[in-house]
Amino acid sequence: MQRARIQYKNAILYAGLFFSGVLAAVSFDKPQYLFVFGIALLFLSYLVQSLRGSYFKGGYLFGYGFFLAATWWLSVLEGYWYLPFLLSAYEAIFFAVPIYLSRRFFASNSEIRFYILFILISLFEFLRGYGRFGFPWMSGGFYFSETIFKKALSVYGIYAAGWIFYLLIAALASVLFSRKKITSLFIAFILLALLALPNAVNEPKFAEKITFQLLQDNILPSEKHHKDISQREKLISEHYRKLLEMASTDYDLIVFPESVHPGVYPWGVLSDSKLLDLSAGGSVVILGCESFENKKYYNSLVIFENKKTVYKYDKRFLVPFGEYLPYRDRLRWVPVVRDTTDFSFGKTQPVVVTSKAKLGLGICWESAMPGYGTEAALKGANLLVFSTNDNWFLHTNQSRAHWRHTKSQSDASGIPVLQCANAGITGVYFNGKERTLHVWQVDSLIGSVHLSRPDLRYLKAQKIIEKSFLFISLAVVILASLNSRKF
């Protein structure tokens, strides 16, 4: 009977952990839901503490619920209904392992167990975003975009700001679920002050104002990836010509979406005389296209000025399984793999100096790379420009999620950002203010934006602070393990 009660209680706790993970992911939908994210993490603290079953299973269920809610949109793609289940099955490990370690080795120390739990979660969050297989989507710091803590990103960076928030939740969990309430309450106050302190940071200095035109498409995945090559090229050409007709030389900066051009660069001057003419009157034109160089294909942005190409940026952070297949050469025997080609990883710098602005360039997924905007700002950029293809998201909420990641790059770097979407959200954002187009509408967003000169001291400090948090977290875990009676 006693065993049956424990099993029943654990079943409820397992279900609670799964739905807490779902709640944590759903709270990313709007900045007002930051407190919901905190509540979900407090639920995690309580449920993990109460669990008497498999700690790894409990952590895995939380992670599976989190990533399933974050990637469910993949199931709406034709023929890919299984993808969110596979991706979540792998990514859930990055919650399962830290939760298992915290309960297995530090449960006896009630004073620090919650701190160890969230320090380990933050360390594994860094690991899941690291390297070519990294998946930093919806890391903790991204939740701060547009909130009262958005300036914390400009001082601490996306990872370190997230770690401070995790520690704040650990302190609150200690207040609620352990005995040392006064000490933890004091720590919570200090951590909250750390998050609020950057609001006193000076605003960035503004430079000149430039005008822009962002051209938004509404192409469907079924059109862009049509099985009939001739039909696919026809559809893409039709969409491209519509945008080309809308483009005007009245603006300093004209931006096209990712991979909007039907050809492969370099394609020859005559085939795109209209495109080159756009840059004849002093406009800077940014075009998303595929390019071919040194026998390799790249996902690129080509920048035109004065009727000539002045720069080509090749995407450096590719989407695993979307833009390249790991170990493709070993899988050539598989029919579906044999006739496909990967994009190659770009090596060009993401910053280009034009007559209008110093542009920090990025393509799609790159806006979800923590520190991407800061890197560009440190190299002199005073405006971020992301060109993206969000038609994969269809009519789901993930266009908003991607836009939040993009806005986080602006909050962290202190410079404004433009995003031009090939179906999705096209918009301009800086310091909590934004303008966007309606999703899935052929249109252009026209406006102006002040270039900014952020304080480079804060940007340089981000790198130091993030590395410090990483090493301090590792040191705390090591010291705690040495003092633990479980070892």
Image: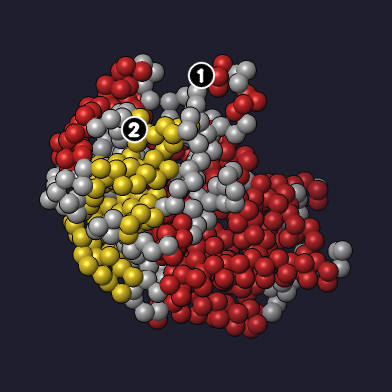
**Residue 314 image position (x, y, % from top left):** 43, 43
What residue is at 39 percent from the left and 40 percent from the top? 300
Which residue type does callout 1 highlight? Answer: Asp
Q: Are marks 1 and 2 in contact (CB under 8 Å)?
A: no
Secondary element at tag 2:
loop
**Residue 373 image position (x, y, % from top left):** 42, 59
Which residue type does callout 2 highlight? Answer: Pro
Q: Earlier in the sequence, mark 1 or mark 2?
A: 2
For label 2, the crowd category at 10 Å Cα-Cα, with few meaning under 14, some 14 to 19 and many 20 or more, is: few
Question: In the figure, 402 relative to 237: above or below?
Answer: below
Q: Nearer the viewer, residue 103 or 153?
A: 153
- State the quadrant of the C terminus: bottom right
- Its colouring scheme is secondary structure
Is residue 90 at least partly visible in the picture? yes
What residue is at 21 percent from the left and 39 percent from the top? 276
Question: In the figure, 394 relative to 484: above or below?
Answer: above
In the image, which is nearer the foreground, mark 1 or mark 2?
A: 2
Q: Which residue is mark 2?
A: 266
What residue is at 40 percent from the left and 81 percent from the top? 200
Q: Nearer the viewer, residue 462 or 151?
A: 462
- Residue 413: quarter of image: bottom left
Is residue 398 at least partly visible in the picture? no
Marker disc for residue 386: none
Q: Which residue is mark 1?
A: 339
Secondary element at tag 1:
loop
Query: Along the horizontal axis of the image, is 35 left or right of 86?
Result: left
**Residue 228 image position (x, y, % from top left):** 36, 16
